[in-house]
Image (spheres, rainbow, N blue to C red):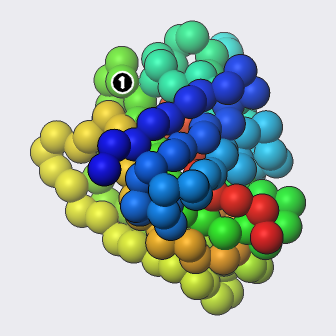
């Protein structure tokens, strides 16, 4: 079966014919685009490195282009997005930094929760990828339902993300 994908100017993604999205007529869009994001800390630099840059639609991964998040060097650095309500999440796509430092995203976990503090979660997957982490990481979430998505390092390092897309549908 073939799959077709359309990316709209608002960052939403539509898919048809992909069984992993629930069947031939199923679709999803980028639930995270433009939504409120936060991170454990924000690195001080001459250009902004705010959490919201991971949901701005720019996937190039170049820090000096001003569209990459960056935390301080800390234990358990994290980034998260609030989808604004409980959503059905089919896939999470993480765009790593591409100009350097991609190896910082090598020992981390991705979680989905209905609570902003992640005291409980409906999905959690850990990754330990060295020495060459991928530039684009695609995770199937298989229709998990949640409001918040978090990416958290499991050790001490900086966390930099180019973009995070949460593909799914409204409930």
Asked if residue 55 can be seen in this view, the reply is: no
Q: Residue 7: give x, y in percent of width and height.
A: 59, 28
Which quadrant is the C terminus positioned in? Answer: bottom right
Residue designated by label 1: 98
Residue 88 in which image quadrant: bottom right
Q: Residue at x 46, y 45 (%)?
A: 94
Residue 35 in which image quadrant: top right
- Horizontally, is 30 left or right of 19 in the view? right
Q: Would you call the spot at circle 1 few (<14 residues within 10 Å), some (14-19), or many (20 or more)?
A: some
- Horizontally, is 4 left or right of 29 in the view? left
Q: Residue 93: give x, y in percent of width and height.
A: 47, 47
Q: Residue at x 36, y 24 (%)?
A: 98
Q: Residue at x 59, y 22 (%)?
A: 58
Q: Nearer the viewer, residue 107 or 7?
A: 7
Q: Residue 33: give x, y in percent of width and height.
A: 72, 39
Asked if residue 14 can be seen in this view, the reply is: yes
Which residue is most to the bottom? 120
Q: Nearer the viewer, residue 23 or 66?
A: 23
Q: Is residue 101 above or below residue 62?
A: below
Q: Secondary structure at mark 1?
A: loop
Q: Residue 116: give x, y in percent of width and height.
A: 77, 72
Which residue is most to the top? 65
Q: Is residue 120 above or below residue 3?
A: below
Q: Residue at x 41, y 62 (%)?
A: 20
Q: Nearer the viewer, residue 139 or 43?
A: 139
Residue 53 in which image quadrant: top right
């Amino acid at each position: 079966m073939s799959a077709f994908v359309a990316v709209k100017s608002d960052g939403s993604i539509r898919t048809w014919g992909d069984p992993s999205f629930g069947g031939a007529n199923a679709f999803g869009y980028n639930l995270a685009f433009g939504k409120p994001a936060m991170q454990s800390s924000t690195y001080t630099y001459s250009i902004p490195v705010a959490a919201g840059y991971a949901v701005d639609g720019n996937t190039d991964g170049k820090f000096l282009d001003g569209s990459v998040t960056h935390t301080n060097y800390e234990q358990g650095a994290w980034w998260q997005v609030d989808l604004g309500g409980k959503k059905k999440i089919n896939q999470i796509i993480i765009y790593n930094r591409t100009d350097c430092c991609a190896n910082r995203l090598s020992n981390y976990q991705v979680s989905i929760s209905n609570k902003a503090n992640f005291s409980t979660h409906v999905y959690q997957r850990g990754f330990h990828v060295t020495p060459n982490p991928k530039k684009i990481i695609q995770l199937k979430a298989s229709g998990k339902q949640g409001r918040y998505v978090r990416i958290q390092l499991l050790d001490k390092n900086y966390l930099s993300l180019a973009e995070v897309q949460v593909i799914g549908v409204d409930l």
